[in-house]
Image (cartoon, rainbow, N blue to C red):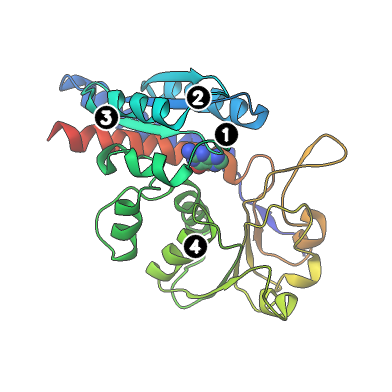
């Protein structure tokens, strides 16, 4: 059996077209959605991501402001910049690109973003709202994963879902969203015993480990939906996921490629969140 590829680029184009239509409607009412992205330092991967976000904004008709700050920026300076953007009514979304230089406390920075402008969905208020099923900004990567699973036509309801990885920005929220969709969810991590066996029981397998080829073919249940969140730069200089794509494709029914899978969907969901932020702030 060879799995059907879930085309993240095509699905992202659909989501961005939805966002663009919503932007048009807002602009007709005099509201111009605007996303501010703060990039501290010169991390090469972050620079690529930020350029991609600006390009997506342009495609959707969203104004983007990229604020580049030097690696030596202090926490107080960054907090000041966030304070300015928080008070600026023409800015609807604020995103601080992670990771931050080591002199800056990430939690303090995320805390400083007003929840109504936190389009990443990382602030404790949005995390708490998600946990309790209240309206909130959903974190973009997990929300993109759900949309990709839904695109297959496979129902999440009642399925056994396994998430490998327990980060605050992917693993934990992905597990919570799958639970919201009535999956029976297991979270695996570096201390998990019988990892391969647990993965092999998953109808839906989400890999968010950050290690190339970590999920082997034997860890995939025949007919599973496999979502690969990993983006790893291989020794060959190319991008690879956490899943051994060739081996997993022999077993899975549906699988996301890397690149061209979760990455573009994450950015598309950010556009949706930004439009939602602008619409809510206009009320
Ligand atoms: N760095 C890697 N992924 C993300 C993300 O989704 N949001 C932010 N702010 N930084 C990131």
Q: Residues within 10 Å of mark 1 (few under 14, many from 20)?
A: some
Q: CA distance from mark 3 to mark 2?
A: 19 Å
The label shown at residue 172 is 4
241 above or below 195? above
Q: Which residue is mark 3?
A: 86
Q: Respond yes or no on whether mark 1 lies under 8 Å from ligand 1.
A: no
Residue at 50% from the left image edge and 28% from the top image edge: 53
Report how far apart the C-alphas of labels 4 and 2 lie in the structure: 30 Å
Where does residue 233 sit, x and y in percent of width and height? Answer: 77, 40
| SS type, badge 2 | loop
Residues at circles 2 and 1 in contact by the CB criterion of under 8 Å: yes
Location of the C terminus by quadrant is top left
Task: Name the image quarter holding the N terminus.
Answer: bottom right
The residue where tag 2 is placed is 73
Circle 2: is it few (<14), some (14-19), or many (20+) Cα within 10 Å? some
Which is more foreground, mark 3 or mark 4? 3
Q: Position of residue 229 (x, y in %)?
A: 62, 51
Which residue is labeled 1 in the image? 101
Q: Earlier in the sequence, mark 1 or mark 4?
A: 1
Gap between marks 3 and 4 measured at Cα: 27 Å
Give the mark nearest the N terminus, 4 or 2: 2
- Residue drawn at point x = 48 percent, y = 42 percent: 105
Q: Earlier in the sequence, mark 2 or mark 1?
A: 2
């Amino acid at each position: 059996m060879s799995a059907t590829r879930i085309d993240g680029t095509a699905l992202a184009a659909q989501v961005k077209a939805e966002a663009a239509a919503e932007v048009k409607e807002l602009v007709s009412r005099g509201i111009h959605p605007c996303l501010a992205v703060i990039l501290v330092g010169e991390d090469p991967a972050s620079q690529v991501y930020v350029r991609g976000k600006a390009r997506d904004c342009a495609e959707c008709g969203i104004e983007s402001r990229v604020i580049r700050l030097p690696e030596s920026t202090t926490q107080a300076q960054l907090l000041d910049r966030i304070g300015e953007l928080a008070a600026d009514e023409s800015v609807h979304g604020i995103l601080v690109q992670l990771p931050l230089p080591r002199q800056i406390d990430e939690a303090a920075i995320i805390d400083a973003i007003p929840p109504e402008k936190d389009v990443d969905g990382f602030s404790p208020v949005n995390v708490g709202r998600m946990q309790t099923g209240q309206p909130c900004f959903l974190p973009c990567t997990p929300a993109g994963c759900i949309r990709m699973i839904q695109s297959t036509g496979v129902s999440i309801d009642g399925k056994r879902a396994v998430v490998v990885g327990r980060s605050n920005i992917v693993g934990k929220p992905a597990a919570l969203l799958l639970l919201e969709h009535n999956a029976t969810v297991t979270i695996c991590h570096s201390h998990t015993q019988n990892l391969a066996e647990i993965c092999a029981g998953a109808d839906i397998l989400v890999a968010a480990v950050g290690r190339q080829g970590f999920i082997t073919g034997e860890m995939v249940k025949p007919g599973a939906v496999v979502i690969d969140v990993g983006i790893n730069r291989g020794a060959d200089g190319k991008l690879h996921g956490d899943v051994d794509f060739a081996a997993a494709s022999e077993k899975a029914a549906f699988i996301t490629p890397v690149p061209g899978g979760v990455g573009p969907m994450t950015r598309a969901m950010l556009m949706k969140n930004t439009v939602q932020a602008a619409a809510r702030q206009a009320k």
